């Protein structure tokens, strides 16, 4: 028996004016052993200059994608960390080029192992998170559909069945780094989320999965008379 991961608390932050220094708000209530996820979206529409991200201290990069090989128009980086309990309220990240950014952070309990991530979909059109088949077969997975794009058109529909934890965040500067998230808790071997419906734009998308923790074993003790 197992059970699904639980998103305990979340937080968001943005950098509206393009720059290289980005402050990310972390979730509240962090305890040792929690899994922390950062979804870090970027936009460099006006500059058209690719850049790279220096990962926040202590976090491991799960994956990164951009529609032009860097942060040319839109980019998304997913990072994770097993918390020590000594984390503060914020953490910094730097980019090698001036970009706007938007960030969502999650604190997750009741998980096991490290997250899995798909390849990245990029180009123009609606963000379409690719299929993902984690190693080890079917488990109680928290499936996360992730999309990012330049400018700030609203999401008119989320991927089918991804009805939980739906959120959209955009910076408000000229470049408008935007991203959206949605989740599905399902015991299965694979998932291929549908699209985030937005107006046609430069975009990037991926799928993330995290397995639930095994349930505590039930021990039956027989009393002898």
Image: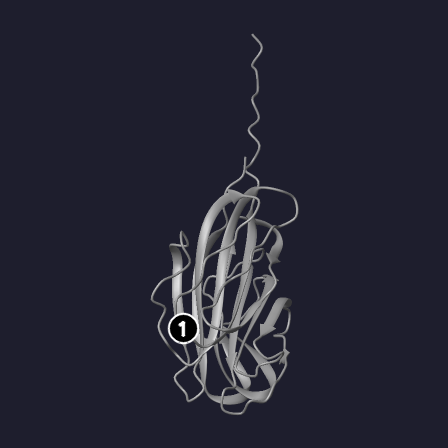
* Residue placed under numbered mark 1 in the picture: 169
140 left or right, relative to 165: right
Q: How is the image coloured?
A: one colour
User: Where's residue 190, x and y in %?
Assistant: 56, 48
11 left or right, relative to 51: left
On the question of residue 34 being in view, the answer is no
| Residue in front for this viewpoint, 150 or 215 | 150
Rendered residue at 41%/87% (across/down)? 173
Up/down of 42 relative to 210, above or below: below
Rendered residue at 62%/84% (across/down)? 51
Q: Quadrant of the N terminus?
A: top right
Q: Callout 1: helix, strand or loop?
A: strand
Rendered residue at 39%/61% (across/down)? 158
User: Where's residue 122, x and y in %?
Assistant: 55, 71
User: Where's residue 193, x and y in %?
Assistant: 48, 56
The crowding category of the residue bearing disc 1, from other C-alpha atoms within 10 Å (few below 14, some 14 to 19, many at least 20), is many
Up/down of 211 relative to 32, above or below: above
Q: Quadrant of the C terminus?
A: top right
| Residue in front for this viewpoint, 97 or 212 | 97
On the question of residue 170 being in view, the answer is yes
Q: In the rendered image, which quarter is residue 56 located in?
A: bottom right
User: Where's residue 8, x and y in %?
Assistant: 44, 56
| Residue in front for this viewpoint, 104 or 83 | 104
């Amino acid at each position: 028996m197992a059970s699904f991961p639980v998103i305990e608390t979340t937080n968001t932050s943005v950098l509206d004016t393009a720059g290289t220094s980005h402050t990310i708000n972390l979730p509240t209530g962090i305890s040792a052993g929690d899994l922390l996820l950062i979804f870090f979206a970027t936009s460099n529409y006006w500059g058209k200059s690719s850049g790279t991200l220096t990962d926040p201290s202590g976090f491991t990069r799960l994956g990164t994608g951009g529609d032009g090989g860097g942060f040319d128009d839109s980019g998304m980086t997913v990072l994770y960390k097993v918390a020590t309990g000594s984390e503060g309220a914020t953490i910094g990240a730097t980019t090698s080029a001036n970009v706007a950014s938007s960030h969502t952070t999650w604190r997750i309990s009741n998980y096991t192992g490290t997250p899995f991530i798909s390849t990245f979909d990029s180009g123009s059109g609606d963000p379409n998170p690719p299929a993902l088949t984690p190693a080890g077969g079917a488990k109680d997975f928290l499936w996360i559909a992730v999309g990012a794009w330049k400018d700030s058109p609203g999401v008119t529909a989320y991927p089918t069945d991804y009805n939980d934890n739906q959120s959209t965040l955009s910076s408000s500067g000229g470049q408008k780094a935007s991203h959206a998230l949605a989740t599905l808790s399902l015991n299965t071997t694979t998932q291929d989320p549908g699209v985030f419906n937005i107006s046609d734009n430069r975009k990037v998308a991926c799928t993330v999965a995290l397995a639930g923790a095994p349930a505590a074993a039930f021990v039956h003790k027989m009393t002898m008379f």
